[in-house]
Amino acid sequence: MPRRSYLAVITAVVLIPSVLVAQEPRHPLDPLGWQEYWQVIEILRDAGRMDESTRFSFVGLREPDKAVVSRWTAGEPIPRAALAVVREGPRTFEANIDLVSRQVTEWTEMQGVQPQWLREEFGTGVAQALENPDFVAGLKRRGFDDPSVVDCSTIPLGYFGTEEQRGRRVGYVFCEDPRGVRNTWPRGISGLTAVVDMSDGSVLRVVDEGGARLSSTTAEYDRASLAPSREVPGPIHVTQPLGPGFEIDGHRITWQNWSFHVRPDTRVGMVLSLVTYRDGDRDRSVLYRGNLSEIFVPYMDPSFAWYGRNFIDAGEFSAGGLTKPLLRGLDCPAHAVYIDHVLAGDDGRPQDRPDMICVFERSAGDIAWRHYGEPPAGRPARDLVVRAAAVLGNYDYVFDWVFRQNGSIAVGVGATGIVEVKGVGEAGATATPIGDGKPDAYGRFVAPHVVAVNHDHYFSFRLDLDVDGSTNSFVIDRLKSVTLPEDNPRRSVWVADETVAGTESEAQLTIDYNRPAVWRVTSDQRRNQVGYPTSYQLMPGSNGNTLLSADDYPRRRAGFVDHHLWVTPLAPDEWYAAGDYPTLSEPGKGLPAWTAANRSIADTDIVLWYTIGMHHMVRAEDWPVMPVLWHWFELRPFDFFDGNPAMDLPEAP
C-alpha cells in the first residue's frame, strides 16, 4: 500500500465504538458466522465427505432464492445454507450444505474445471524447481550460485489449450532476489520459468529466454527510506460530535432515506443488497444486489514469461479473501465504522479478518444544488461511503459505493499499488526500432534497467436492479441528429429515439461516443406524476475498449470484455462474468455462454453486467507506488421521482 498522504491532517471526535464485530446471522443474507464455518466441517465429516487431507477452495453463504428473502420477516426462522468447493486430490466437488437441518443436500463432482488457487499452492513445486538442473543452471547464469537465497512462488497463468496444459493443473514458478530490500517487486529474475504439475510438484520443463542481471535500483517506500515529509500547514479537522449520521443493525445500514444490507464476501469483496430509498412514507426498491463480479488483467508482453499473465483475479486468487483488512488512519477517515469478516482457510476452519469494510459520511464542500437568483439559494451535500480494498499481488484496488442525497449511487474503482516490471540490460529508453529488440517495446522504463509492462484492467460489476419492483425492462435512448426544414434558421437538433431491448443480444452494448445513448432500467409497475415509467440510468464514466483481437485466447477466456454492458434475465446460478471456475479455463465461459440462448429480457427480472476498462501505459509518476487512479460509473434516478429529491436538505449552518 502507498504511504499516507500528508496533504491533510484528518481528525475526528466520535462517540461510538469504531468496530462492528462480525456477528452470528440475523438476516438470510448475512455472511457465514464463526460457528457456521465449524458446522460446515462437522456436517461434511459426519457425512463421510472429508478427512484431514481435504482442502477447500471456497466456503461461503449459499444465498436463498430472491423470493425467499423477499418473503422473510424479522422473527421468522432464518434459512441458512453454505456452498463449499471441496478438493480431494485432483478431484473437485461442490457441496450444498443446509445448516438448519445439518445435511449435505447436494454433492456434485465438477468435471473439466479447475478451482481457484489455494494459499498453500503458491509454494507447490518450488522445492522441485530449485533442485532442477536446468533451473539451477538458469539461476547461475544470472549470478545466483546459491539457489537458497531466492524467493519463489507458483501461480496459475492463462490457459491456451496446449498439450502441456490439457488435463493438468499447471503452475508456473517465478523467483526474485529479496536480499537487502523490503520491496521485492523490482527484483524479479527475468526470463526464467519452471512449468510444474500441481498434482505432485514435478517440473514439466524449464523455459529460459535469457535475461539481464538484476538492476541495483531500489524502490523502497517505507517511511525510513523516503525523504522527510513535506510541510503542510493548516490542518483540516473533521468532527462528528454527535456520532455518525447512519445506523447499523447487524449488517443493515440506514442513512437518511437510504437503507441497504452489506456483507463482506470472500470472492468478490463485498455485496450490497436490498437497497431502498424512502420516498415520503414508502420504501421504494432500487437495487436487489450489487457487487464486483470479476477482474481481468492481461499483460502485453509476448515472451513466455509474460504472455500467460492474463489474470482473472477474483476467480483465481480470492483464496484467503479478495479484499484485505483496511489500514486505519489511511484507508478511511478516523470517524469511520468498520465491519469485520470471518472466512475459511484451506482447511475450512474459520479465520477472523478485522476491518474488511468501512462506512463513513463525507462532506467535502460539494453542492447538492444551487441557483443564484431571487433569492439566491442552495444546499450543501454529504455522502455515505462504503469502502473495501483488494490486494492482488502487486496491485491494490479500492472499491467505493457512494450513496448520495439526490438518489444516486456512484461506484468507483481506485487502482494503486506497484506496477509489475521486468529487468532489462539497457539502462533507459533508446531509439532502437521495435523490430531490432527495443527493450521498452511492450512497456516503459520507470527506473534504470526496469521496464513496467503495458497492461489492461477490467472490472465487471453485477447489478440486479429492482426499480420499483422486480419486473423491469431495459431501455436504450439513442440520441440522433435530425435535420430541420430549410425554412428553420437552425439546421439540426438531436432527439431521443427510445428502444426497449427484447432479447439479450439487443442489450450487448459498447460505448461509442460518436453514437451517444442513455441506458435505463424501467419499472413496468409504476409511473411518475407526468406519466413516464420510473427508471434508473446506468451512466458510464471514462472507459476503454479491448484492443485484443477476437481470436486471442485471453480475450476468449474473459469474453465479458467484448461489451461494456450485458443484460440477462435473472438466473439462479449466474454470478460471475467469466464463469464459476475461471482458473485455467476454456474460452467462452460465463456471459458469452449464458447469452448464447438470446433469452428474453423484457418485462422480467433483469441483471445488468457493466465493465469498467482501462489501458495502463505506465508513466514515471507511477513508480515506485502508483497514485490512486479512479474510474467511476453511476446509478442515477431518471423519472424515478416527481422532482429533485434533495430539495428538502437543510441549509448550511
Image (spheres, rainbow, N blue to C red):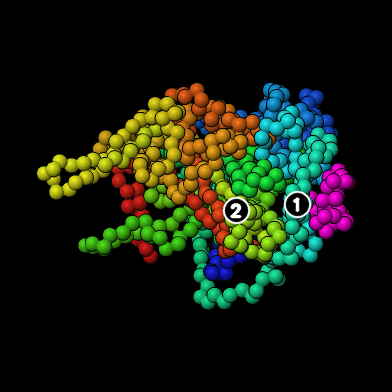
Tell me if residue 89 can be seen: yes
Q: Is mark 1 on a helix, strand or loop?
A: loop
- Is 358 situated left or right of 653 in this image? right
Residue at left offset 39%, top offset 26%: 502
Q: 552 above or below 235? A: above
Magenta-colored span: 127-152
Q: 591 above or below 207? A: above
Query: What amino acid type should be assigned to the residue bearing mark 1?
Result: Gly
Residue 468 in the image, given as x and y percentages of width and height: 39, 34
Residue at left offset 88%, top offset 56%: 146
Q: Which residue matches tag 2? A: 434
Instruction: Place residue 49 in its image quadrant.
Output: top right
Q: Nearer the viewer, residue 457 or 520?
A: 457
Residue 322 in the image, given as x and y percentages of width and height: 64, 45
Residue 477 in the image, given as x and y percentages of width and height: 33, 37
Q: Which residue matches tag 1? A: 210
